[in-house]
Amino acid sequence: MSEASGDEAAGDSAGREKVPSKLSAASIGLDWTKVRCPCCISDRVEPLVLVKLGEKVGPETKRWIIRLIGASQKDGGAALLAHPGEDASGDIIVVSAPRCTLLRATEELGLCKLYRNGDMEAFSYSDRDNFKDSDNMEEFLTLAERQYMVKYELDGLRAQRDLRIPGLPDSCTLHNRDNIWQKLRSFGVIVDTFPLHNPDKLKNLSEAWYSGNQLAQPLDSVNEYFGSSMAFYFSFLDFYTWSLLPPALLGLTITYFSGEVQKEMVESVSGPQAGDVEGDSEPPVSGHMLQAVFSMLWSTVVMELWKRRSSSLSYRWGTLHLAERFAEPRPGFHGDLGVNPVTGRVEPLFPEWQRDLRMALVSVPVVGLFLGLVVLGMMCFYWAEAQVQHLHNNWDSLLSQTLLYMPSVLHIVYTNVLATVYKTVAQSLTEYENHREESAFQNHLTAKVLVFTFFNYFAVLFHIAFFKQDVPLLRKRLASLLIVTQLINQVTEVVIPFLVDRFISAPHRTESKDDPQEEKFRNQGTLPPFPGLFAEYIELLVQFGYLSLFSCVFPLTAVLLLLNNLTEIRSDAYKICKLFRKPFSPPVANMGVWQIAFEVLSFVSVVSNCWLLLLSPRLQEMFQEGGMSSTNVLLLAVLVEHVLILIKVIMAVLIPDEPDWIRKKREHIEYSSMQALRQQKLQSEES
Amino acid sequence: MSEASGDEAAGDSAGREKVPSKLSAASIGLDWTKVRCPCCISDRVEPLVLVKLGEKVGPETKRWIIRLIGASQKDGGAALLAHPGEDASGDIIVVSAPRCTLLRATEELGLCKLYRNGDMEAFSYSDRDNFKDSDNMEEFLTLAERQYMVKYELDGLRAQRDLRIPGLPDSCTLHNRDNIWQKLRSFGVIVDTFPLHNPDKLKNLSEAWYSGNQLAQPLDSVNEYFGSSMAFYFSFLDFYTWSLLPPALLGLTITYFSGEVQKEMVESVSGPQAGDVEGDSEPPVSGHMLQAVFSMLWSTVVMELWKRRSSSLSYRWGTLHLAERFAEPRPGFHGDLGVNPVTGRVEPLFPEWQRDLRMALVSVPVVGLFLGLVVLGMMCFYWAEAQVQHLHNNWDSLLSQTLLYMPSVLHIVYTNVLATVYKTVAQSLTEYENHREESAFQNHLTAKVLVFTFFNYFAVLFHIAFFKQDVPLLRKRLASLLIVTQLINQVTEVVIPFLVDRFISAPHRTESKDDPQEEKFRNQGTLPPFPGLFAEYIELLVQFGYLSLFSCVFPLTAVLLLLNNLTEIRSDAYKICKLFRKPFSPPVANMGVWQIAFEVLSFVSVVSNCWLLLLSPRLQEMFQEGGMSSTNVLLLAVLVEHVLILIKVIMAVLIPDEPDWIRKKREHIEYSSMQALRQQKLQSEES
């Protein structure tokens, strides 16, 4: 690798070329800290993570932090490599990781890697030599994994005894088992910790991803560069976009052949016309019905197939057997010190029942309150709208005309304020629930925000469909939502950040080849932090909701979504590559709570579609001609609904969640670990 | 143990006291075969299993079988101990097992046993000395486990090459990898293989179980003597019976306070009376509604709590980590020889997709056909009944009066014939599906019979409730079913076998203390084989169905069931101890497919109860007074149903399936095996 380093973005930095013999442990100069073990000595050190210090942090504090990062784990350090940047008293520390620390972290995280027999196997540090490429970290681990591991080690730093931090006032002391990184952040010593971009890799990735006219995304490279949580999002986006093809084709066919829908669609845009629905030569099964039944079954099949794809991706990316449960708890976790009954390690413990109690008695009521506020807001909006309409009809004046807009404006303001407040509240509620694992924390937080957002987006549509029972209004609303929100999303997500970046941030960040390395690193810190995948997933979920819940009233939904997603893939890719700071991405085995959200939606779709079928003007007409009473029609709809739910459940049970070959691999791993356990007992006995 | 052997039933048998030095491997005399390893030498050998040979089996074949049973596993034998009985040419072989074989089977089955640190741990042969009581098989393993292991070893015998069996015609040869025991059975050489009772233990068990007025069952002793599948049945029966208390109390209260129900119940027995439902001072919420909502929630809570209890029982009985998937396939399994991708052993393989195809293209249509025949039968019955009623009204004669009974009689005959045919068909279908594991075979067989039986039992009730919509008829039918079928069940299950045993079988089986041991063994073979728990579980399931689906129309259901179950526990216990041959019982971790059947029923109960609520005369009346249209009432019912299903799903998700302490134990075992796998890779590397 060392001959290629001239090409590398960071290759010409003074701090990069490291000859271990030059280092001395005592003085921390302008070079990387010393590596601890001979196997980790390598010709070049790759800068992985940048730590930004507070402005007022003195050089002695910086020295202390660098020493802490470099100290071995048994001395309470992170066993990483630190570089003070160009200036020993500057406000950045560049962090990298030696081979041993990375390999141990790979084992601790439970990542699977390619074994010499060609299978993926859970990595074992003691067996490292039998894993492919385990001597070359840049091949063995992905860039995202290496960077996450640095964060993992830094976040895992805990004080081994009470101590004072040099250069800080006495109020800033660490107590035994305090999480050091978290405390330093709360003292203002550390402002930011973020992974560094690798400009060459980024360039290659963006060329393969969004610059050309590619149909397929380079998912493996995305996983390599941005990590598996990001790669899972883009895989799902890809999978979902392709699976939009059948409903899109169906939608086009229906629109083409069914005069009824065309007419209704024209109406929905140009307002109701005189002639009502009275087509004569129409087939007995309307497009409306076809679309409803199709989208119910489609949503199940898509989600089941995605689960299978998801499990093969997680095998491919080595995240099938993550050991998060057995790892150290996440930094924010607190509790009384005790022996973990599972791993036998001393760590903070927090009783499960206490967490359950907090969720039941605090989180659930608070979330319920906010949902109530959403509904209240909607009701007030309808009430106020009726009032001003009434007012306007009575006194037609300019004042009353402006008043007509008041309810909408107030409602939008109210909804936004509520959403902002709710996000903060959800964050503190989830903190208070004190989850042990990062993934549990994220899932609970996501679930909370999800329920609220779902309510926010769909409450109005459900209200129109179930209470007002007004299909044309629903169609109109759906069409405008689809078109308007997608435009708005694309603009807010890409165009605005792009403009801000180009015209406001970039001028301050003019970068040239000759800039010192440190300047380039520092520049990355000026980009806004990546806001997370929440908004992206929500967008997909809302889309999926429009499609599976309501698409039967507007058959072109899938076509519009397909078009949107084809650009969405590119714009998301551009955004994440160019407009934001690179995010840390923990290895994950699936989409987590989002998977459940999509599946729940696909069940709700049965109820919603049956109901919309019932409201379908064609069906109403047919039944009236057939002389069926409305009660019997309703009974029939309920029966159909139950049968369809049954079919959905049976399909979900019958389609296995993982492909056969993955199941065999998994069982093989389970079998070997069972065998190994038996062997080990014997050996521990003999020794 | 040897000083206690005088007390033991088999203690004075000539074959029991074995001094290994006396044995010679060459001649097979009237004694136990030789043990292979020094650790297995013990003072006494416990007769575990009796093999009954065909009448025409010659002494040389018997000698060959005995040698096969005694041969070590690498020579293709079962590594068990065999005893030829009193007479070297007699038609029985008594089989026992040495310590080593039992311990190896314990490991292979994946049983957990008490480790020296007091936890249950998966047993490991190489670590045997650290498990409690591992030197004393009668303490270490339960009697049922020891007997099942003998069967497991015998069933696992496979020919290592093509061979002729001495004393049999040339047509009876074994091919390589043939299952020997299965072939011998098909040749008629082996008639029966059954476990032997231990009279003393049986006496103790029956005293603790059903002779006195005990409220609690000795479940651990049942597990020890009859094995975990039996113990799970009785545990569930026990749990379920206690959980009937709340609905029974509610039912009594409702019956006491609600005049309406009393009147309707009187009507249901004495026929409808003139005065219709017009109570004035009745409370607005009728007992009917209370009972409906209660039984929906009750059934969920009971099933969730049972799952928790079930997992703690399986921990207690050491069956939490059964390794059935990794064990040899079941005897009936056939396929092309190949390398199992999971365990790496050579064994018959059968592709998954082929099994799926067979299920989809053969089993499902055939089962569907039979279900159709049930419905057809019911429809013919109703049609015929209407016809003869019509006929009787027109020509009232003696002939027409007898004809009135014809439809019922024909329907009963038809149903019974269909059920018998179906059982055979289901058996062959499941054979044809060629499942690898015994439990998979049993579950698929049970599921097939279950669906049919369920249809058979409930089709009529559903027909009355949903199509005829006749609550009084439903109540009448339910009451008569509850009382009549329970009486019939008790009689056919216990009284008839008891009478048969006492007056027909027993006189041929007069047993005295002085009888030779062999005679006592032989006598056990004259008892009928135990028909399995299928009928018992079905009875409970049907009960549970009556209660959760329809009990709101007849509040005393739970009381009747409670009374029935209190006697059922005793009569089942008596039956299994006295009236049948002892069954083999494989170790199981839960109720298998029955668990699912009960849970499905508890979901169906929501639909059924909501519907019955809707039919409730009180509610109908209230709504009419309130001026609601029948469509709106129906809509309300659908809404209530959806909300209740939602509540049920949320409850099922929120109540964890295993108690917290079991989860920790399980995770601990997973963690240790993960650690062990990493260690082992290193060691296999070093060696």
Image: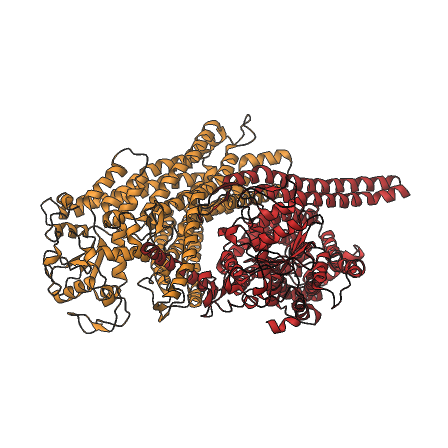
Chain colours: A red, B orange
Left or right position of B332 against A11 = left
Let me know if residue A276 appears in the view.
Answer: yes
Looking at the image, residue A437 sits to the left or right of residue B551; the answer is right
Is residue B492 positioned above or below A211 on the image? above
Q: Name the quadrant containing residue A251.
A: bottom right
Q: How many marks?
A: 0
Q: For the N terminus of chain A, which image quadrant? A: bottom right
**Measuring 51% from the left and 68% from the top, which residue is drawn there?**
A135
Residue A458 is left or right of residue B190, and the answer is: right
Name the residue nearer the viewer: A37 or A197: A37
Nearest the eye: B123 or B383:
B123
Q: Is residue B226 above or below residue B243?
A: below
What percent of the width, then of the height, locates residue B568? 32, 40
Report x, y in % for residue A187: 65, 44
State the residue in front, B533 or B8.
B8
Q: Position of residue A415 (x, y in %)?
A: 73, 45
Quarter occupied by residue B239: top left
User: Can you name the residue that lies furthest to the top here?
Assistant: B281
- Quarter placement of the C terminus of chain A: bottom left
Q: Where's residue A389, x and y in %?
A: 82, 42
Instruction: Note whether residue A280 is visible.
Output: no
Give the vertical position of B451 relative to B605 (above or below).
Answer: below
Residue farthest right in this picture:
A397
